[in-house]
Structures are given as C-alpha cells and as structure tokens.
Image (cartoon, grey):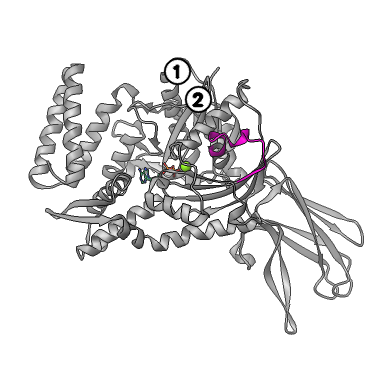
Amino acid sequence: MTIIGIDLGTTNSAVSFWKEQGSVMIPNALGHNLTPSVVSIDDHGEVLIGEIAKERQITHPDMSASVFKRHMGTKKKYRLGTKEFLPEELSALIIGSLRQDAEHFLGHSVHEAVISVPAYFSDAQKRATKRAGELAGLKVERLITEPTAAAISYGLHLRNADTKFLVFDLGGGTFDVSILELFENVMEVRAVTGDNYLGGEDFTDVLTSLFLKQHSLNAGQLDRKTLTLLRKQAEIAKRAFNESKTTTITCSIQDEVYSQDITLDEFEAASKHLFHRLRDPIERALNDATLKIKDLDAILLVGGATKLPIIRSFVSKLFGQLAYANINPDEVVAMGAGIQAALKGKDAMLKEVILTDVCPYTLGTTVSVRKAGYHESGHFLPIIERNTTIPISRVERLYTLHDNQKVINIDILQGESRLSKDNIYLGELNVPVPAKPAGEEAIDVRFTYDVNGILQVEVTVVSTGMKKEMVIEKDPGHMSKEEIVRSIESLSQLKIHPREHQENRLIMARGERLFEEKIGDVRLEIGQLLRAFEEVLEKQDTRQIKEMRNQLKDIFDSIDTKGGF
Ligand code: ADP
Ligand code: MG
C-alpha cells in the first residue's frame, strides 16, 4: 500500500510518493504541486481549500483562515462564519485535500502518511500534527523534521563519509536554520535556530515600501483592498527577478495607474536590514553546534523564498560555497517525506537511516544571585541547554538561602531569557528540607528530557535522600479521546467542494476578487464576464466552459499584471 509524504507548510503544502527510483510530486486538482495552506467556507457551508481559498481570503476574510501552523498545538480557535476550528482541524482539511489528490493520482485509496514538521516543534506541536493526519483519516506513525527531509531528498543519508551540513529554509513567514551531521548512518540534528517572523513575505514588503516611497504614498492612506492589490503586484514583481534584473510594479490606486521599475541592485540595497536578520540565527546555530563556516560540507536551500537571486548570492557570499539548489526548494521537503514514507514501507532501494533529535529550547529553574549585601531572586539557571541531543539527563545542586529555611521552591521554566519572568512557566515543586543555617542544606535538581519530548524533574534532598518528582507533558492543545471522535464527526459532516469543479470555482473566486479591487469600466466589464461565465456553466457544455475559462484566465492575468485589460 502506498504511504504518502506530506509537507504541511505554513504558506504552502505539498504531497509526494515513492515510485520505483525516486520521489514524485503529486499535483492538485488545478495541476499544481503546491497547495496554499488556506481554508475558506462559502455561503452554502462548503469548504474550499488551497488557491480558491486564497482568493476568497481577500474577498471574504471572515470566512477564511491561513498561517494556522503558527498556532499548532494550542487551543486557539479560528472562526469561519458560524463554525470554529482548532489549528489541527484546519490542518486536517488541508491534509484531507492532499490525500484526495493522491488518491485521484494513484487510482487507489491511501491510508497512511509521513508528515514533516519544523525541527523546533515541541512535543505538543508534533502531537497536534499527528492528530491532524489522523483527523484526515490517515495513520501517521512517523513524522520527519523538515531539514532531515530536505537532506534525504539530496541523498545525503547515502553518503559514507562524515558530513556536516546546514539547511537554510526561508519560507513565506518563517526562517529555519538547522545544522545536521551524518555520522556512520546516524543523522543527528546538531542545532536548530531561526526567526519565526522572517520570510519571503518580508521581501515582498520591501518592494511595496519602495513603490510607496517612490510615489510619495503612505500605506496608512490606502484602504485594505488597495494594499492587498499592491502586495499582489509586488509578489509578481518579486518572482520576475528570477528571470530578469529589473522588474516593474504596476498598480492602480484610486483610479490612477502608478508604475515603477525596480532593479535587482535597488532591491538588494533596500533589503539590507533583512540580511542582518538572516545572519543572526546562522551565527547562533554555528555557535550551538560548535562549528565554523569552513566545517560545513554542504548548504541546502529550502523554501520558496530561496529562489530569490538576492538570497542565493547572500548565501554563497556568506558561506563561500554554492548551495545545493537543484531540487525545487519548495518541493524538496515533500520529496524527502515521500522517501521517508518508502523507507517506512521498507523499499529495498533505500538504506535505513537513524535519526536523532535535539531539545529545541533551554530548560531550567530560578535561582537567587548574590548582589552587594543582598540576594536578588528571579534569575534563570539553565539546566538543559537548547540544542542538546536527546535523551539527556542533567543535574544541578542548589543550597538554602536563609537560616532555618524549611522549603525550597523549584520552578520549571523553558526559554532563553536571563530573567525567569521572561521565560515560559511549565510547573513547580516545593521540597521540604530540614531547618538549618543558610547554605547547609542542599538539593539535587535533575532534569531528564526523553526522546518523546517529555520532561521529568526529580529533586533529591542531599542530607535525607528524600525525593520528589514531577513529569511535565506540556500540551495545552491536547484533545481527549471524546474530543477527537467529535472532531472527526463534525469534520466529516462538512461539505468539501468537489475537486472536478475546482478550476471553474477558482476563476469565479478570482473574478470576484478583481471585481472588488477595481472600479469604473474595468469593474463593469469583469461583472459582465462573470455573469456570462455563470450562464455558460449552467449550460454544462464542457468544451464551451473550458474555452471561456481559458479566455477569462488570460484576461484576469492581464488585469493582475497590468492593472487593466
Ligand atoms: P512555507 O514553507 O512557509 O509553507 P514556501 O516554502 O512555500 O513556504 O515559501 C513561500 C514563499 O516563497 C513566499 O513568500 C513566496 O513569495 C516565495 N516564493 C515562491 N516562489 C518564489 C519565486 N519564484 N521567487 C521568489 N520568491 C518565491
Ligand atoms: Mg516549508
């Protein structure tokens, strides 16, 4: 039975499977390998996924949701019209749509998947991802981290020599840096860092800002629709840099068409602040892995935004070597997940790799520090440092602070800040100790973090040997068995828009978006075209529908790029 590999991305998702010699991407109903991770519900309660939902997000923001991966593993509720969804439920709808595409492509049903997750995902986030797969009716025995999936795509796991490499993943709104090492068949994640709020979208913003500045316009003066339109035009211009050193942004604002040529050099100069922000996590990752740039054997580019020529030149300048980029960077994770799926199904072509993991955050407790003549509490004492390979167990000895102190309070925190108040509170233990002069009683605090991301804290009173322990499975988004059953039930009651009609639906959604964006004659014309298309749809003549759909596509492309017919 085919096991599929899924890249469940913040911006885009994709699916692949292993076929004889390698991983193959599976196109969606519109013939595209990427499905935007956007969900929308229409007036009839029908669920739309991917590109159609992305168009509707502009015309019907209250009925649509995107970037929910950011909140995976939390109880955040997304309201779409009258219905509410958890992040894993919205993800389940995306996975369900990819599953349908795979079943259509393969011609048989699919029951199992390997899904990729960011290397920094906590256990709660990983479990929520697994649950999303299960809510979509798929068995998910294995998750694979995104950088590992990319590495497997490039066949790095097949190398015999010790290899250290860095994965540079710039997606839509997130930047992930991972350093991995392959040593004697074991692929070890050595460091994971990144910036959760830096991605290709920031480079689009640079272009919009250049445009606004050139025309002495202020973003605050423009309404939401005009801004959305401008961003869309900037996105088109950004992608045009793949082929040319100059692009043009054209956008009609309040009935006047504005246009501006931007060169690659100007774009690069205006993105300087972003390059600074890219550099920081890279330095941190190298530092955490105790490596120098020259120790890296390879750099892998992952994520759609690494297609930007200014990113490629930044990477080759910084690392002094060309990055691996011959696999499409926005497909490389899905391809790797597909290979891992085959590994799981034990395809003889593949060599098994053992994957190890790291603890993504620092875990520690609070201590007081001695200042001139007094103690100041609230200082964070790291016990397990971030990027330590797991499983791991570490111990710290702490002493009483006051004479006749009867209890030592141990709070358990996660984070990187110097002061405890700025870190995340996970729990606390109060440990009774014999009353003695200050500093004469001590406790050993042991933190153990296992392969499943479960933290166990054990405190031992040194003088008496008394122990107290606590297990922390921080999972705020945990769903009970009953909740899962209820969720599957309510998801299965949703009407999903049939895949056969998606192309027509996309043209209508796009036309509706353009109708809202435009004014005057262009708008009237769009209205007439949409009405004519509706009439053709009613006649149900497939050939005529296809012809008109293609015509409309050309017209809408021209409106989107040139602002008019
Ligand atoms: P994620 O992993 O966040 O789901 P992707 O890897 O699909 O995201 O990357 C999406 C980002 O890639 C978007 O910001 C998009 O603008 C950018 N992108 C996609 N194709 C190109 C291209 N040809 N040139 C420049 N940027 C691109
Ligand atoms: Mg991605």
Which of the image's four quarters has the C terminus? top left
Residue kind at label 1, given as amino acid type:
Leu
For label 1, count other residues whose C-alpha is less than 10 Å away and answer few (under 14), some (14-19) or many (20+): few
> Is residue 359 shown in magenta?
no
In terms of depth relative to the viewer, which is nearer, 76 or 171? 171
Q: Which residue is mark 2?
A: 17
Front-most of residues 456 and 312: 312
- x%, y% of residue 515? 17, 41
Say whether disc 1 or disc 2 marks the residue closer to the N-terminus: 2
Image quarter where the N terminus lies is top right
Q: Is residue 522 left or right of residue 92?
A: left
Tell me, yes or no, whether the two marked residues, 1 and 2, touch with CB atoms within 8 Å: yes
Asked whether residue 154 is drawn in magenta, I would say yes
- Taking the image as drawn, is residue 537 in sight? no
| Mark 1 close to ligand 1, CB under 8 Å | no
Tag 2: amino acid: Phe
Quarter residue 116 falls in: top right
Highlighted magenta segment, given as a residue range: 150-164
Residue sitting at the far bottom: 373
Residue 191 visible, this orientation: yes
Using residue 464 as the reference point, say whether residue 324 is left or right of it: left
What's the residue at 73%, 45% (across, down)?
391
Q: Nearer the viewer, residue 98 or 295?
A: 295
Residue at x 17%, y 45% (from the top left corner): 562
Query: Residue sitting at 62 percent across and 43 percent down?
Result: 123
The residue labelled by disc 1 is: 106
Question: In the figure, 310 relative to 73: above or below?
Answer: below
Residue 552 vs 449, above or below: the answer is: above
Left or right: where 536 falls relative to 159: left
Task: Residue 114 in the image: state x and y as whole percent.
Answer: 56, 30
Marks 1 and 2 sit apart, C-alpha to C-alpha, by 9 Å
Q: Determine whether the residue tagged by mark 1 lies in a helix, strand or loop.
A: helix
